[in-house]
Image (cartoon, rainbow, N blue to C red):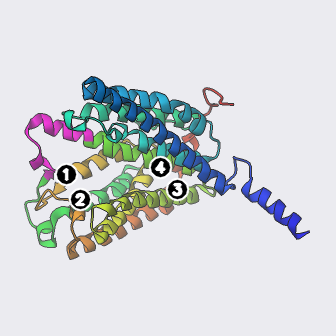
Amino acid sequence: MWGSHAADYARSHFFKNRNGLGGEWLVVAKIIAMMIYLYAVDTIVSDLLDHIWRSSGVAPTFLFYLGTILVFIGILPGYFRLILAETNSPLRMLALFIFYYEAVVIPNTFGFGKNYVSSFDAINLLTFVVATALVIIAMNHWGYRFPRFKFNHQVNYWWLALLVFPRFIFMGFSAGSWSRLFSLPVTFKLASVSDMKGFLLTGVYIVFTVLTICFKEELIFRYLFLSQILNMVTGTPKVKILKSVLFTAFLFALWHLQNFTYQPVLGTIMQATAAFAMGMAFAIICLYTGTIWITVIMHSIFDLFMVDNVSNQSPFSVEPSAFTIEFILITTAIQIVVVLLAIYLVKTASFEQTIRENRLSRQPHFALD
């Protein structure tokens, strides 16, 4: 009798329908299978082109472009069968994130002829554009609209200004001390400008920072994650907004913990703390306005400019000072309080429009049976 109950329990919890949240081992197996698939395609193409490069002397730059195209062609079947065809929302969200993360670094994984290629900028831009397009196609196929450029109908711009303002206060964390922060004049410096030579390099740096860092992170955390999480959580509109904001902010903070590999532990913890507050602020702004574009602009400003910074080195790359810790904790608390006030005091009409329009009112373009 006990054995029969155990078997029923196993069947219901570990062999659950793919639309459910059970079958944890199956979810893990699918993720591992997708990662192995991506790695296998990349390795095969890289080894093949390495052989061609060594035996024929073909220009490595051409082979890098060719290899990038071949890898994308090779991973498309897995993209369609392992990602687009998936119906388990948490699994496909994670799978698409891993796919995107792996796809944008394809040229950097090739081991041949790197010392003979003068610049990877154009190749990296190509992979970014293609990988981003595949993310948008997947989201559209699952029924999520791409963020529009105009705001929701009933946005109160005083509340929007209150949500935006604490994030600009946070830019002062690079001042280095309270005395420098409150002294005049306050200057704004373009990050890493001393490392660039000439106007063209500065322009390239700005474009790549905005696209491959700021827009990419907003695409992942305020579109790929936030849109699907908003659709998965339950409760009243305020509860759904609160859950979505907290969950995506946690993921954004977790993302920054990867910097443990080259930053001090305390500095990385402070960065993750700041990222949590930033994630809450950006998520609530996106949910309130119905678009990610204002956060893309804000994110770009924060990454490109520093307030009266004494050096071009990131404050998180060294052991944080007492000022840095105090400043981050204070501004984090301010941002969390402002976000919570907005969730519970702002009229829900604008949030409800985002919830309502998060999904497209149509079926996917094509079926994957």
Residue carrying label 3 = 244
Q: Earlier in the sequence, mark 2 or mark 3?
A: 2
* The C terminus - image quarter: top right
Alpha carbon of mark 2 to alpha carbon of mark 3: how far? 25 Å
Q: Earlier in the sequence, mark 4 or mark 1?
A: 4
Residue carrying label 1 = 305
Do labels 4 and 3 touch, CB within 8 Å?
Answer: yes
Residue carrying label 2 = 171
Which residue corresponds to the image point at 25% horizontal and 64% vertical from the top-left? 316
Q: Amino acid at mark 3?
A: Ser
What percent of the width, then of the height, locates residue 142?
A: 59, 37
Alpha carbon of mark 2 to alpha carbon of mark 1: how far? 8 Å
Q: Amino acid at mark 4?
A: Leu
Alpha carbon of mark 4 to alpha carbon of mark 1: how far? 26 Å
Could you say which disc has been placed on residue 287 in the image? 4
Which residue corresponds to the image point at 50% horizontal and 55% vertical from the top-left? 347
Do labels 2 and 1 touch, CB within 8 Å?
Answer: yes
